[in-house]
Image (cartoon, helix red, strand yellow):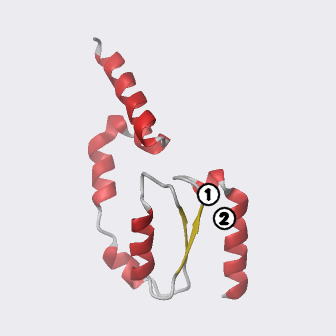
Amino acid sequence: MSDNFKKKLRKNIYYYVIRERDYVDTADRKEQFIKIMNYDMTGIFKKISIPALIVWGKQDKVTPLKMGRKINTLIRGSKLEVIEGRHGIPITEAQKVASLVGKFISNN
């Protein structure tokens, strides 16, 4: 098997298992992707002192809901909204996200 064929096969397997394009699109840059995903932003989140809305997809497999919940606990006074959907909900659920943002802005 050629290397090119192996790369395409691997990307298709990732997509089949995860069902998200982000991981597939970064498969060739695995090391950078891992560094980004493992970067500890705890200190940054704790420094946020303004109202923050966190909108998360309930079925997100790339960045699971538990991560959204953790961010919510780290940002004092933040609000977590969980909606049906996977990774990329600002694109796939744009109207829902826009509505949540509008309500959040109106209330803060």
2 vs 85: above or below: above
Q: Residue at x 41, y 81 (%)?
A: 73
The numbered dot on residue 97 is 2
Left or right of 100: which side holds 42?
Answer: left
Question: Circle 1 is placed at which residue position?
Answer: 90
Whole-percent x and y of residue 12? 42, 28
Nearest the camera: 46 or 77?
A: 77
Q: Name the side, left or right, on which 103 lies relative to 43.
A: right
Characterize the local packing of mark 2: few (<14), some (14-19) or many (20 or more) Cα atoms within 10 angstroms. Answer: some
Residue 95: percent from left, percent from top = 73, 60
Q: Residue drawn 41% across and 43% down?
A: 23
| Mark 2 vs 1: CB contact within 8 A | yes
Q: Amino acid at mark 1?
A: Pro
Q: Does dot 2 land on a helix, a strand or a loop?
A: helix
User: SS for tag 1?
Assistant: helix
- Residue 24 position, x and y percent, is 42, 37
Cα distance, mark 2 to mark 1? 6 Å
Front-most of 60 and 6?
Answer: 60
Q: Amino acid at mark 2?
A: Val
Seen at 42% across and 57% down, the residue is: 63
Circle 1 residues within 10 Å: few <14, some 14–19, many ≥20:
some
Q: Quadrant of the C terminus?
A: bottom right
